[in-house]
Image (spheres, grey):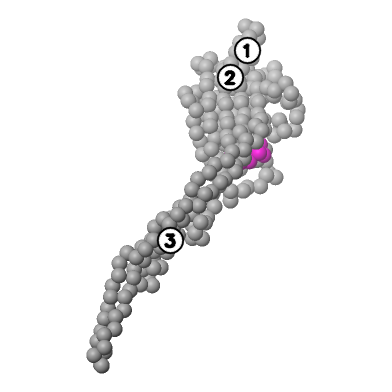
Amino acid sequence: MKRLFACLLLLLCAVLSGCATNNVTPPLHFAVLVDSIAAENRGVPKTYVIGSGDNKISSGDLHFREYAEQVEKALAVNGYVKAASPDDAAILIALVYGISDPKDTTSSYAMPVFGQTGVAASNTYGRIGAGGTFSATTTNTPSFGVTGYVPITENQTTYTRYFVATAFDINASKASGKDTQLWKTTVTSSGSSGDLRYVFPYMVYATQPYLGSNTGKKIEVKVMGDAPGVAQYRPATQPVVTSVATK
């Protein structure tokens, strides 16, 4: 009986998220959406310069330089070469980035409470003593199930982080007097972290295979917090955190 009861308790712990045997924080991960579109290949050399696409942010801004350097590393993997000067570049890449105001949401649900619901079976054993007296012992096997529900309310704060890289054909734009786009890659990620500097390397890492290409649709890329490939984009002073479920 004791062995059976212990097995039932272990089974309940596997079902209940609050049990100590299952109270493990999931690994950190980021969900990144990449939406990239490109014009037909014009045979434009992959030499580029990068600048701020936001008139409120200077290309010399320290934050901009940090983000731009990370995007430049992804461009290099895709065969792009940073020009020594704007006169040597065939492509101008405008980079815009930002983060939304916090969005607070509240969700409510009922969590089931498990416990003993009754008796599943009973067994009675009897014996006759030396004096002709009869004694009996009854053993009950308990049944377990949902005994009730506890209301749970969760508050969550979410931020939307993003960056957009748009490439322009410099010579074609000069000739036509209009901006001539070569490609545009839009990247978004929603999560609990309001620190864009922390999240940005993960976003760039997720985007690298699609940067400057035509995805045809939004693609979701999940990046684990300890993904080794992120290190090449992360500033040397930035710590690695892997113990929070979703950032």
- Please provide percent x and percent y for residue 210: 52, 29
In the displayed structure, would residue 128 be above or below residue 247? below
Element assignment for label 3: strand
Q: Is residue 192 magenta?
A: yes
Residue at image coords 63%, 47%: 240
Residue under numbered circle 3: 115
Q: In front: 109, or 169?
A: 109
Q: Quadrant of the C terminus?
A: top right
Q: In front: 11, or 203?
A: 11
Residue at the outermost bottom position: 131
Q: Is residue 245 magenta?
A: no
Q: Earlier in the sequence, mark 3 or mark 2?
A: 2
Disc sitting over residue 226 in the figure: none
Q: Of the residues shown, which amino acid type is indicated by label 1?
A: Asp
- Please provide percent x and percent y for residue 104: 62, 38
Residue at image coords 58%, 48%: 244
Left or right of 223 on screen, residue 118:
left
Q: Nearer the viewer, mark 3 or mark 2?
A: 3
Element assignment for label 2: loop
The magenta-colored residue range is 191-196
Q: Of the residues shown, which amino acid type is indicated by label 3?
A: Gly
Q: Of the residues shown, which amino acid type is indicated by label 2?
A: Pro
Q: Nearer the viewer, mark 2 or mark 1?
A: 1
Residue at image coords 59%, 29%: 75
- The Cα atoms of the two marked residues, 2 and 1, are separated by 17 Å
| Pointer 3 with pointer 2, Cβ within 8 A | no
Q: Quadrant of residue 135?
A: bottom left
Residue under numbered circle 1: 179
**Residue 230 in sight here:** no
**Residue 86 in sight here:** yes
Disc sitting over residue 45 in the figure: 2
In the displayed structure, would residue 163 be above or below residue 136? above
